[in-house]
Amino acid sequence: MCKPIIKWVGGKRQLIKDLKRLMPKKYNRYFEPFIGGGALFFELKPKNAYISDYNKELTNLYTTVRDHSDELIADLCKHKNESEYYYKTRALDRDKKVFAKLSDVERASRFIYLNKTGFNGLYRVNSKGECNVPFGKYKNPKYCDSENIQACSELLKNTEIHNGDFEDIKEHVKEGDFVYFDPPYVPLNATSSFTGYTDQGFDEDMQLRLRELCDHINDIGAYFMLSNSSAKYVYELYQGYTIHEVKATRSINSDATKRGKITEVVVTNY
Ligand SMILES: C[S@@+](CC[C@H](N)C(=O)[O-])C[C@H]1O[C@@H](n2cnc3c(N)ncnc32)[C@H](O)[C@@H]1O
């Protein structure tokens, strides 16, 4: 019964129906190189998968859930839902020497705790890679969900997990495999971009490099499905492929009046 372990900006939960409708009916191995919160991955529960992300804390989280679930649960249950404790735990990444001394389990536990008790369940880092989300003041945040961790640990046992750039999948994808790409979106306008996933950002050159990887996947007879915004540049990049339009409600904008349904695209090569 495993559900996504963390809430993630740009999470795909609300588009699951569309994505399931648009994905290929049959494929060999499942790949998701911008795994984030993994909404589609946890929905599909693939038997043989490869997931990755550039964000080290995120991939450490999934590896720890897979390989050390008992220790992780024990550590998670030690946390406290208190402002002072939250800021002390958040501040552990301010001193790189202190942070480097944390074990993988402690880092994964901190990550889940900050995600569940931080404001809006949002994870964001500044240009130095430091988490800067304020305390969320929630009554009863569920950071010690042992049942879900154990269920996810079982699912992840069939999964190869990597930390790194999306292009690293190139040598692993074979004919008949399926890749779902959910990259940071091309901004619709200069102020709408969210760049806090990693300390690296994701510019037009990266979007182009991603399109080139899609061309390669297409050339070798594998399938890809890609989500992105409806920016003009996305239509230009993927002309020649099938572009589906879907509607999503995006709530990253803190101005509630600006939370409407917006068009996003799903590109496929089949
Ligand atoms: C839109 S989010 C994915 C959301 C995910 N589908 C979900 O349901 O939660 C984009 C992800 O891309 C990752 N990312 C950013 N740059 C990357 C890169 N160069 N290579 C791989 N992953 C990257 C970010 O860390 C982030 O987790």
Image: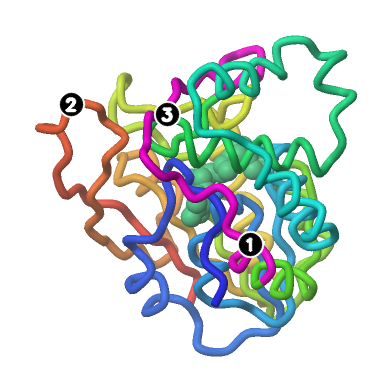
Quadrant (top left/top right/bottom left/bottom right) for the N terminus: bottom right
Q: Secondary structure at mark 1?
A: helix
Q: Are marks 2 and 1 in contact (CB under 8 Å)?
A: no
Image coords of residue 142 (percent x, y): 49, 50
Residue 147: in magenta span: yes
Q: Which residue is mark 3?
A: 194
**Crowd tier of the residue under label 3, counting other residues whose Cα lies within 10 Å: few below 14, some 14–19, many 20 or above:** some
The Cα–Cα distance between marks 2 and 1, rounded to whole angstroms, is 35 Å
Which residue is at the front of the view, 212 or 164? 164
Q: Secondary structure at mark 3?
A: loop
Which residue is at the front of the view, 259 or 24? 259
Q: Which residue is mark 1?
A: 146
Q: Which residue is mark 2?
A: 255
Q: Secondary structure at mark 2?
A: loop
Residue 38 position by quadrant:
bottom right
Q: Are marks 3 and 1 in contact (CB under 8 Å)?
A: no
Looking at the rendering, the stretch of residues picked out in magenta corresponds to 125-150
* Left or right of 111, for residue 101: right
Front label number (2 vs 1)? 1
Asked whether residue 208 is in view, the answer is: no
Q: Main secondary structure of the magenta part?
A: loop
* Left or right of 134, for residue 157: right
**Crowd tier of the residue under label 1, counting other residues whose Cα lies within 10 Å: few below 14, some 14–19, many 20 or above:** some
Q: Are marks 2 and 3 in contact (CB under 8 Å)?
A: no
